[in-house]
Image (cartoon, rainbow, N blue to C red):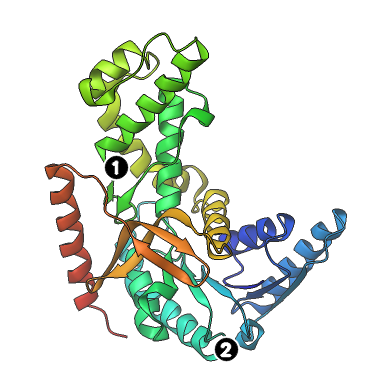
Amino acid sequence: MKIGIVGAGNVGASAAYLLAIQRLAGEIALVDIAADLAKARAIDISQAACVFDLAVRVSGGADYAALADADIVVITAGLARKAGQSRDELASANAAIVANAARETAKYAPNSVIIVVTNPLDLMTFVAFKASGFEAERVVGMAGELDSARLKFEIREASGEAISNLNSVACIGLHGEGMVFPEQTISNLISQASQARLCDEGCKRPLDPSKETIRDLARTEFSGFDISNLNEIKLRAQNGGAKIVSLAGSSAFYAPAAGIVKTCLALGSEEGERLCCCVVADGVAMGREAIVAKGGVKRILTSNLNSAEEAQMRANKAKICAQISNLKL
């Protein structure tokens, strides 16, 4: 499989390194307006691959022709978010960058699937969809898996629960402050962890979450998790990226790179995988649960939302529609 990455900054280079070391691609092409940076990163990653005797070929440069015949093209290029800057403030400048990258991708890799990582993620996913002319299922935004990981991290930190007990969660909606964390997700996590603990103890009693509230479950079986802190935990997860920016002065890149790799894994699979990702549907691009496999998005799934969460999703849709209407592509 050949994977092209537009943008050889921290996110793009980290993703290329992970893809190479995990043997997910036989060929990786890094493209960046800073040609020497892309070349340097390509050489560095190639040498790292040689440490493990891996045959992957990594190239770097400024010419989009390097994307020729790529199966997947990841767009990470764009201006990084600065401390105190919202994702929305990046929109105008990054839209032009992403649109150009999408058009060049369509020119040199017309059969590829595009993964968008540039912020503001949901809007940039729509920009790539329009500029590339690709079918909606061949343009995916990588954010939901990152948001889900941040929620899992905060729950683990708050509860002390083993990460193996925290199955994937369904963080949907707009990336960033518009993330929607369905309460059913928390219920499922608690019940799964509790069930596993009970079975470890000899299955003392069956657990029936349908007859117990989340608060009951947390109090009786998930003692390390204080349900009263749920809103605070959600807020910390929503601000997970901003916290890194405030501490380091630059955006996160290891976790986003991991999200890219997970999406590439799904796109390389015939069977497919259930992912939280940004998809284009009903005239907007927004985070949903979907089945992603070779060729792109196969099916958008329906999430189990309560009335407040449905209202938040409607508000998200209205917000992204307004942003789209202001776009000049």
Q: Which residue is mark 1?
A: 181
Q: Is residue 120 visible?
A: no
**Would residue 241 be found to the left or right of residue 260 on screen?**
left
The amino acid type found where label 1 is placed reads Phe
Q: Which mark is residue 108?
A: 2
**Which residue is rendered at x = 25% and y = 16% of the image?**
216
Neighbours of disc 2 within 10 Å: few (<14), some (14-19), many (20+): some
Q: Please tell me in which quadrant of the rendered image residue 220 appears.
A: top left
Q: Position of residue 209 (x, y in %)?
A: 28, 24
**Which residue is rendered at x = 85% and y = 53% of the image?**
52
Q: Position of residue 156 (x, y in %)?
A: 45, 28
* Disc 2 element: helix
Q: Quadrant of the N terminus?
A: bottom right
Q: Position of residue 103 (x, y in %)?
A: 46, 87
The amino acid type found where label 2 is placed reads Tyr
Q: Position of residue 144 (x, y in %)?
A: 39, 53
Q: Please tell me in which quadrant of the rendered image residue 154 appears.
A: top left
The first of marks 1 and 2 along the sequence is 2
**Would residue 198 be found to the left or right of residue 233 on screen?**
right
Q: Is residue 53 visible?
A: yes
Q: Which mark is residue 231?
A: none
Tell me if residue 204 comes above or below residue 30 in the rendering.
Answer: above
Q: Please tell me in which quadrant of the rendered image residue 235 appears.
A: top left
Tell me if residue 203 comes above or below residue 275 in the rendering.
Answer: above
- Camera-nearest residue between 175 and 278: 278
* Residue with the most extreme bottom position: 107
User: Does the CB distance between marks 1 and 2 fall below 8 Å?
Assistant: no
Q: Quadrant of the C terminus?
A: bottom left
- Alpha carbon distance from label 1 to label 2: 38 Å
